[in-house]
Image: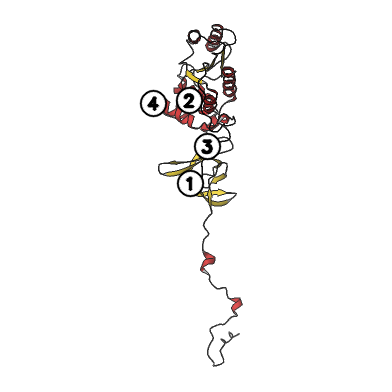
Amino acid sequence: MLPAAWPHDACGRRTGERYPVAMVHRYRPEAHTRREPPQVPAEHGLVVEDVTSGWVGAVVRVEKSGGQHLVELEDRHGRTRSFTLGAGFWIDGAPVVLVAPRTGAPQAPARTASGSRAVAATPARVARASRIWVEGRHDAELVEKVWGDDLRVEGVVVELLDGADNLPQAVRAFAPGADRRLGVLVDHLVPGSKESRLADEAVAAAPAGTVLVLGHPWVDVWQTVRPGRLGMDAWPQVPRGTEWKTGVLHAMGWPHATQADIARAWARILGQVRTYADLDPALLGRVEELIDFVTA
């Protein structure tokens, strides 16, 4: 069959339209333009997926490092990883561009890191005569990070004991009394241990009801930080005779040859502690008891 003749106008000229207009799909550039993913602020608690690694987690914080914004995502096991803000994320299976959250007027937190209700604009209380002692600097820094706000409101000073070996003598020198109570937090306080014996001697060295010695069962205060915060299922076991911190860092694959390495490792561990929820309950209850004791 011969093709249909081209249509002509009344003067016999081709019109150039062989098919009805309704049958022709005209090219529209805007219909083929690729839509850009929406920009979504990385607000705390937002659950996203990193497309490249498949890591799924909730936003716990956004920080600026090396001239770029990083978002830290925590998965359902409590492990965290950091990613660069920008494209490459999904929310509910759809691509998005994560951007830094909008900053407004700073708001006072409703609760402190220990979970207590925050008291806004309250000046620190004049220090009480009562004290809380901890074994070492790392213990003190951890207590300050989680309970610091509470301690300032209550006027409680935390002091370093520098080891528990001389605890009974230190208690006698402190001379506790009814208005001068002493709370002591020690590591590895388990029945039959050296620390348990020293705790009993310390309590006996002061008037009844003026000294309270409590502790957690772990070898070192590092172990009171939940291992999931460091991407581990459990803290490594250290062979007997090996210095504990050195052995732990070796097992974790972290630098451990010098005291500076250990200091940097602790700073890294402490940096993963945000609130009381990141700590073992064996420590939480003991610190709360000591605060109640010295403020009673």
Mark 3 secondary-structure assignment: strand
Question: In the rendered image, which residue does mark 3 sit on?
Answer: 80
Tell me if mark 4 has few (under 14), some (14-19) or many (20+) residues whose alpha carbon lies within 10 angstroms of its own. Answer: few
Question: In the rendered image, which residue does mark 1 sit on?
Answer: 85
Q: Which mark is residue 260?
A: 4
What colour scheme governs how the chains and residues are painted in the rendered image of this protein? secondary structure
Q: Earlier in the sequence, mark 3 or mark 4?
A: 3
Amino acid type, label 4? Ala
Mark 1 secondary-structure assignment: loop
Check whether the beta carbons of the residues at disc 4 and disc 2 lie within 8 A of each other. Answer: no
Q: Residue at x 42, y 26 (%)?
A: 263
Check whether the beta carbons of the residues at disc 4 and disc 1 lie within 8 A of each other. Answer: no
Whole-percent x, y for residue 192 in the image = 57, 10
Q: Residue at x 43, y 44 (%)?
A: 68
User: From the image, which quarter does the C terminus lie in?
Assistant: top right
Tag nearer the camera, 4 or 2:
2
Tag nearer the camera, 1 or 3:
1
Q: CA distance from mark 2 to mark 3?
A: 22 Å
Question: In the rendered image, which residue does mark 2 sit on?
Answer: 141
Q: Is residue 172 visible?
A: yes
Amino acid type, label 2? Glu
Mark 2 secondary-structure assignment: helix
